Amino acid sequence: MLISLALSLLPTTLYACTQLPAGSTMWVRLTQSVNSNDAKPGMLVHGFLLESPECDGRAALPIHIPVDGRVVSGHRVGLGFVHETASLQIEFNRILPEQSPALEISGQVINVNNAREAVKNGVMLGTRSSETPQGEISSRLKYLPSLHLYPDPFLLGFKLLFPVFPEPEIYLPPGTDLHVVLKKDVALPEELLPPPSVPRISNDDLLSVADSLDHLPARTFDRKGHEADLINMAFVGSREEVVTAFLVAGWKQSDPVSRHSVMHQFHAFLEKTSYKTAPMSRQVFDGRLPDLTFEKTFNSYGRRDHLRIWQVQRANGSLTLWVGAAVRETGATLSVMHLGFMHHVSADLDEEQHAIERDLLGVDTIESVGSIERPDEPKAMLNATGEVLRTGGDVRLVRLRHDLDPNLVSVAQDAPFKPGSKFSRYVRKEILTVRSDLLRANCFYAVYRVGAAGTRALRAKWAKDSEIKSMGLHAPASSQSQTAVKKQPDDKPQPHVNPEFFGAGFW
């Protein structure tokens, strides 16, 4: 009787949350495509819960349950006579848990994961197709000292015949991840059961992995010997299980550095689009290049999650352990100082750990999880390019399922989104190009753009310098050797860089 009574009271005693407060956030993954060219107000939008909002510090709802929404507004570019840029507003209004009444919500999109589109007040704002690096140079810098429009007939002919022109319409395919905030409180029904928790890795395995990490460096190093990324992930599983888990989760293995991949990368940069398997800069850990490299992006060249993974040789042979350095890139620029592309990164390494775990849980590839504290490691640091990195100080350990089916990996390629006919898209290119140049190809706008860009750059530099100074950090000097960057304890192996790993080029 007492056991039955205890079991009957278990959901309420362990899960006393009755309301999701306004401001709570969740992640929704779309199960259908939505685009600004065809979207109409009131059109239904369907997805599922990728990550639940939290209540009292824990997930309130199970993942994978349906989430419904609707299009509030949408403006297409069309031929470009009325709008230069597209916009799209989606709000989610219902969560549909199993064996429970539907939850009426008011959910506003605040971010599209790894997208080039900005989101302001819940409205997704499309990119201006004429605002490409080619357009900046040919229509701004060239006319900086000039009041005349189109003084160069050869340049005009080139722009009309061979414009580098990204698609201006907003397109969200199935699998797009949207970050959503609740605008109002949501009452939870009493009969709602708590979601199942992810199993914890055993203490024996945690201690075994912690012992292995104690004998390894905590950072990766670039080709000049500077400390780069932080080891913040670890995985238990075979190579096939690691590869399958990430491919099922929508991540891609990066291409090797080659002439073709560099040209592809440069074209993606010019066209303001994505290169889903772009090569990564070369880093070493414990004297070795990565065994695996994974990345995940959407439609932006400069924004992606990426992860370098190394296999660790275990002395006892009981576990196949992999360690990884995960970081989120938030932008990319051509850098004269670094002689190539420079990627800016998010300082929040803990959020990147969370994002990887969220993606793997979303496709049910995790068996158990755990964390290993590294109290002796700094909580703030700089990478090789002077970007600030912050961490809570733990390595997230993930044991992958051993029964993963490689056939779950989809090899189908997304069909490019091309609204309208080829002729109408060409007409739209010319209309938008001429329209933009009539408004912006003059010295006044060029001075404004240069001034605004310079102001933003100075503010960003001042903010970063202030943050670095407040944390007592120092940017790496190019003359430092790798062993001088960070002194290793005597009982740890000294890291080293072998130049032959890197080869020639700016990678």
Image (spheres, rainbow, N blue to C red):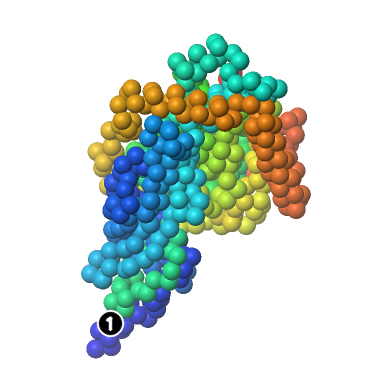
Q: Is residue 122 above or below residue 426?
A: below
Image quadrant where one finds the N terminus? bottom left
Visible in this render: residue 313? no
Image quadrant where one finds the C terminus? top right
* Left or right of residue 292, residue 436 in this image: right
* Left or right of residue 361, residue 460 in this image: right
For mark 1, what is the residue? 8
x and y percentages locating residue 425 in the rendered image: 37, 26
Amino acid type, mark 1: Ser
Q: At 57% across and 51% down in the image, what residue appears?
A: 348
The one of 303 and 352 positioned closer to us in this rendering: 303
Mark 1, residues whose alpha carbon is within 10 Å: few (<14), some, or many (≥20)?
few
The one of 56 and 455 positioned closer to us in this rendering: 455
x and y percentages locating residue 355 in the rendered image: 46, 50
x and y percentages locating residue 107 in the rendered image: 40, 61
Q: Is residue 218 above or below residue 181?
A: above
Q: At 43% across and 54% down in the image, what residue appears?
A: 109
